[in-house]
Amino acid sequence: MTAITRDSTVGRIAAERPFAAKVFARYGIDYCCGGDKPLGEVCREQNLDAGAVLREIEEEPSSGSTSGERWDQAPLGDLVIHIVAAYHRPLDAELPRLEAMARKVYEVHRDKQPEMLARLLAVFRGLKSDLEDHMAREEEILFPMIKKGEGVMAEGPITIMEEEHESAGAALRQLRELTGDYRVPEDACNTWRALWHGLASLEEALHQHIHLENNILFPRTLEE
């Protein structure tokens, strides 16, 4: 494992030290779509102490808070299988569940925050539709190419997937802004609370999902 410094990109850090993803999430550091930025630059932009972030990354494995799999060293076929099983299939059930809750919260509570809840429902529906189409095309077109070792021919599809990841990242940022960083209103019902928790969990999972593709799967596919 190579040493990490302020000049290391956040995407490479997360690839080589999977535990770092938890640290980045705590600080709100974008390590998936913004994975090509050096840690020092990101910390300056967000007024963070880069030294403190580095220390937490070094200390994170000993906390036992998560398990770290070195997918940057695994066969590409195994990584594809992991992405589909760990992220695509759970989204098949989670996206409709969250949409149903968002619709229910809007219908029951729109008199309290009509503009925010209407916008949140619209943004989420757009994200859900885009993700479902995105995952289907990955599984039908791109992933089979990677499994067959045809990565040299995948530059076009990969470019499209990366652009769609940027769009998903923008939608996630909108949802976080609309919810005030997922702070639950004092008078929120159980469904409202569950929705905020579910959206926050979706954001974390999508960050990990996109990171595995943008910073590990896609670069390695084009290199090999």
Image (spheres, rainbow, N blue to C red):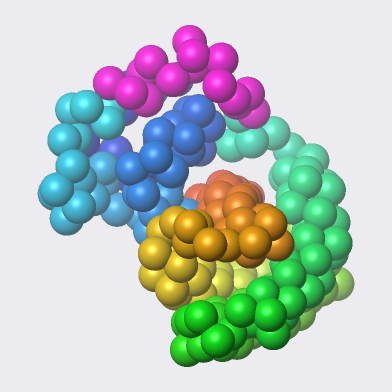
- The spot of residue 142 in percent (x, y) is 75, 68
Residue 114 % position (x, y) = 51, 88
**Horizontal relation, residue 206 to residue 75: left or right:** left
- Based on the picture, tell me whether residue 62 belongs to the magenta stretch: yes
Instruction: Kindly identify the residue that appears in the image at 73 percent across and 38 percent down.
Output: 75
Q: Residue most toward the front?
A: 187
- Residue 17 or residue 150, whichever sits in front: 17
Q: As drawn, is 46 to the left or to the right of 126?
A: left
In the depicted view, which residue is nearer to us: 44 or 177?
Answer: 177
Q: Does residue 193 appear left or right of residue 76 in this picture?
A: left
Q: Which residues are magenta?
A: 55-69
Q: Nearer the viewer, residue 24 or 9?
A: 24
Q: Look at the image and tell me whether residue 192 can be seen.
A: yes
Query: Which residue is depicted at the point 78% across and 74% down?
Result: 100
- Residue 170 quadrant: bottom left
206 vs 69: above or below? below
